[in-house]
Image (spheres, grey):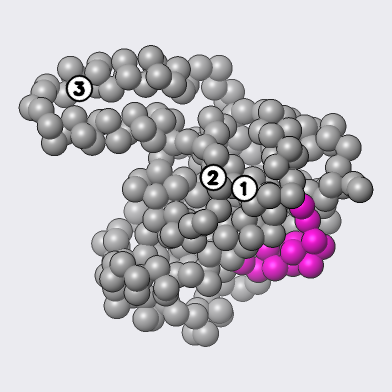
Amino acid sequence: MTIKIGVCFFGITRSVSYTIGNIEKNIYQPLEKLGAEVKKFAHFFELEKIENARSGETGKIDINEADLLRLDDVFFEKPERFLSKSSFELVKGYGDFWQDDNKSIRNLYHQLHSMKTVTQKCLEWDPDIVLFLRPDLNYHDNFSTVLCRALKKVGSEHLFLPNWQHFDGFNDRFAIAVGQEAIKSYGLRYNNILNFCRKYDAPLHSERLLKFSSEGIRVSFIPLRASRVRVNGVVVEELFLHYKTMNFAEWLDGAISLSSSLKKRLVWGVQKLRFGDPYKNLEK
């Protein structure tokens, strides 16, 4: 039986002209070598420009850049329209984690709604494995090794997530999900937003929501790296330190009083000793 691998893009089409080279090299080409049946889906919002006060990002968006992704099925939707039927107003009552008048929560709702929509369409195809990808990420590493690991997990429920920037949850930049329940736990977590806020009586938080939604699913953390690319092509400097290194840094803050330079040397030493240099061979 031929393995079916779905690729799900979501969000908005900013910066695809800058990221497509690495998407082709590090994701599409490895997929083509697997001998699996691959189908690429996407849901994007028809947004003409972006203005983000928190990140300082402004610029025009060309939805035609979606063509560069060589998609099999793509769905476009006007932004905002789904919000009136969502739990957005209720969730606002649990607080604003980013303290920006709920703009980041609104953006997160759009992202998760987009992911939910494309996941539902992909699930109709009955895939064994799904890659969840943001089109505005510069994927620095080849996916071959992790894809081979995922193939060996077919028949089980498994998530492969980046091992950096967990922020008290799980990194939600991209993922490889194996099995229907794992695919749903990642791709349909929009459905868990209100449940998360009610359970913890806390504001919506993207990484913590993913950890909540994936309870009961086996998770492996992988060293694949990706950087956000702004609409003007500017690449965001990401912190790729292993999440256990970051946990050590937080413990160090509370345990001992140290100079910032000594703390940085200790944290970097732990990172290199246990997990290696996370910036080694970082493709641009």
Label 1 and label 2: CA atoms lie apart by 6 Å
Please name the amino acid that badge 2 sits on: Val
Please name the amino acid that badge 1 sits on: His
From this viewpoint, is residue 83 visible?
Answer: yes
Residue 211 percent location from the top left of the image: 44, 54
Q: Quadrant of residue 149?
A: top right
Q: Earlier in the sequence, mark 1 or mark 2?
A: 1
From this viewpoint, is residue 115 visible?
Answer: no
Q: Quadrant of residue 115?
A: bottom right
> Foreground residue, 228 or 116?
116
Q: Residue at x 68, y 49 (%)?
A: 156
Q: Secondary structure at mark 3?
A: helix
Residue 14 percent location from the top left of the image: 59, 51
Residue that badge 3 annotates: 263
Please give left or right for residue 29 compared with residue 247 in the image.
Answer: right
Residue that badge 1 annotates: 158
Q: Over which residues does the magenta segment extend?
A: 116-128
Please name the amino acid that badge 3 sits on: Lys
Label 1 and label 3: CA atoms lie apart by 36 Å
* Magenta residue check for 121: yes
Q: Quadrant of residue 180?
A: bottom right
Q: Earlier in the sequence, mark 1 or mark 3?
A: 1
> Foreground residue, 243 or 112?
243
Mark 2 or 3, which is nearer the eye?
2
Label 2 and label 3: CA atoms lie apart by 30 Å
Give the number of the disc on residue 219.
2
* Magenta residue check for 139: no
Q: Residue at x 34, y 53 (%)?
A: 54
